[in-house]
Amino acid sequence: MISIPKSMTDTATQPLTIKEFLKLPETKPRSEFINGKILPKPMPQGQHSLLQIELCQAINRAANPNKIAKAFPELRTTFGGESIIPDITVFRWVNIPIEPSGKIANRFNLPPDWAIEILSPDQRQTKVLRNILHCLRHGTELGWLIDPEEESILVLDATQRVEILSGTSSLPILKGVELELTVEQVFGWLTLG
């Protein structure tokens, strides 16, 4: 892993295409390609990491046994001229790219069926919301923006209708995934004890 050189993030002087971006070595922190620019993805902190792990595990426990869907943490998805790394992507089993050998592919050049972003303390809501909207414009069915500080979850559906949920509100889940969660349960994972 390498750091992002200043010259790579300053695309005003040297425009970069998505193909050129994808040929670059992976960086640390990882970077996304949005609107023709390379943007570093914030490193997750404690609450972010725990929510990411718990939510991936909960989705996979519910969706994997019957091969309905699979949740992936920090998976690069490239589609619609951009390459983004949502905190969690959920793909229906039938949409997971498979190599001729039967193994899962390394590159996912399609939008997730469900995109989940978890707001980090110094991260701007508009940037992560923009990523979710990009996904929805390209076929994603459901998007969540989890805000640990506010203990709320902004939910967007395929029509880009927005709902802010908190407390004991039940969360909409990708159709076919037998999982029931409330906002309160999700944030309850942050309390160890």
Image (spheres, grey):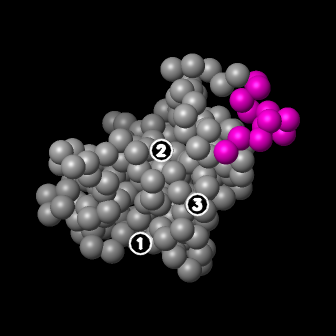
Question: Looking at the picture, which amino acid does disc 2 mark?
Answer: Arg
Secondary structure mostly taken by the magenta-highlighted segment of the chain: loop
Which residue is label 3 attached to? Answer: 80
Residue that appears at 72% across and 47% down: 36
Badge 1: how crowded within 10 Å, few (<14), some, or many (20+)? some
Residue that appears at 58% across and 70% down: 137
Residue that appears at 66% across and 25% down: 4
Badge 2: how crowded within 10 Å, few (<14), some, or many (20+)? many
Q: Nearer the viewer, residue 146 or 14?
A: 14
Region of the chain picked out in magenta, as a range = 6-17
Residue that appears at 55% across and 34% down: 23
Which residue is label 1 attached to? Answer: 172
Q: Nearer the viewer, mark 1 or mark 3?
A: 3
Question: In this view, which residue lies farthest toward the top?
Answer: 2
Q: Is residue 119 magenta?
A: no
Q: Secondary structure at mark 3?
A: loop
Left or right: residue 7 versus residue 136 is right
Question: Looking at the picture, which amino acid does disc 3 mark?
Answer: Gly
Question: In this view, which residue lies farthest toward the right?
Answer: 13
